[in-house]
Amino acid sequence: MEEKTKLQQEREALELEILREDVARRRADKEFKNQARKDQEKGFAEQRQKAAAMQAGCNHRKGGKDYASTQKRGDGDNYAVVKHTFPLGDTAVICTRCLFIWKHGTSAEKMPDGSPNPTGISYKEAINFPTDNTPSGSVQFGLRNIVAA
């Protein structure tokens, strides 16, 4: 009987040890995931800052040679933008040099989502940029083309 009690106590001690190890592993996994998420968010923030700095320094124009072209400083009369119309009719203006996108509702100070506009150029100004680029568009569709069966 004494041996059985000792074995039961040993088994309980082992189960407790396994449980502690499991809890410690789960806590470590959770901490690792939290740290990975923080690192990822930091990387995204750095990318957004770099993009905003590049977009703030871009003049959105075509042309430029050598150093001028690599520094987003085109010297042409036309802008390096594409005007893209989405299926429901909204049009966005996209700079092909810095990849900034002006959407309807962008003011010189803020984007439609409330974030700052690094370019200082509103959608109304951007939509009127002179360009010799061909506008792009999505397939236009409407509910009137759907026939009820």
Image (tube, rainbow, N blue to C red):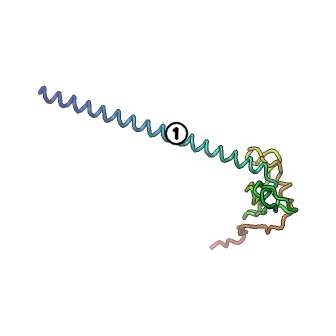
For label 1, the SS is helix
Q: Nearer the viewer, residue 30 or 63?
A: 63
What residue lies at 30% left-to-right and 31% top-to-bottom? Answer: 16
Q: Nearer the viewer, residue 128 or 146?
A: 128
User: Residue 139 sits in which quadrant?
Assistant: bottom right
Q: Residues within 10 Å of mark 1 (few under 14, many from 20)?
A: few
Q: Quick one: which residue is furthest to the top in this view?
A: 2
Q: Amino acid at mark 1?
A: Asn
Location of residue 63 with respect to 2 vertically, above or below: below
Left-right relation of 99 to 25: right
Q: Nearer the viewer, residue 90 or 97?
A: 97
What residue lies at 61% left-to-right and 42% top-to-bottom? Answer: 42
Q: Quadrant of the N terminus?
A: top left
Left-right relation of 22 to 62: left
Q: Quick one: which residue is furthest to the front in this view?
A: 66
Residue 71 image position (x, y, % from top left) = 77, 54
Q: Quadrant of the C terminus?
A: bottom right
Q: Nearer the viewer, residue 63 or 48?
A: 63
Q: Which residue is mark 1?
A: 34
User: Residue 136 sits in which quadrant?
Assistant: bottom right
What residue lies at 75% left-to-right and 54% top-to-bottom? Answer: 100
Location of residue 85 with respect to 29 vertically, above or below: below
Residue 69 image position (x, y, % from top left) = 78, 58
Residue 60 image position (x, y, % from top left) = 81, 57
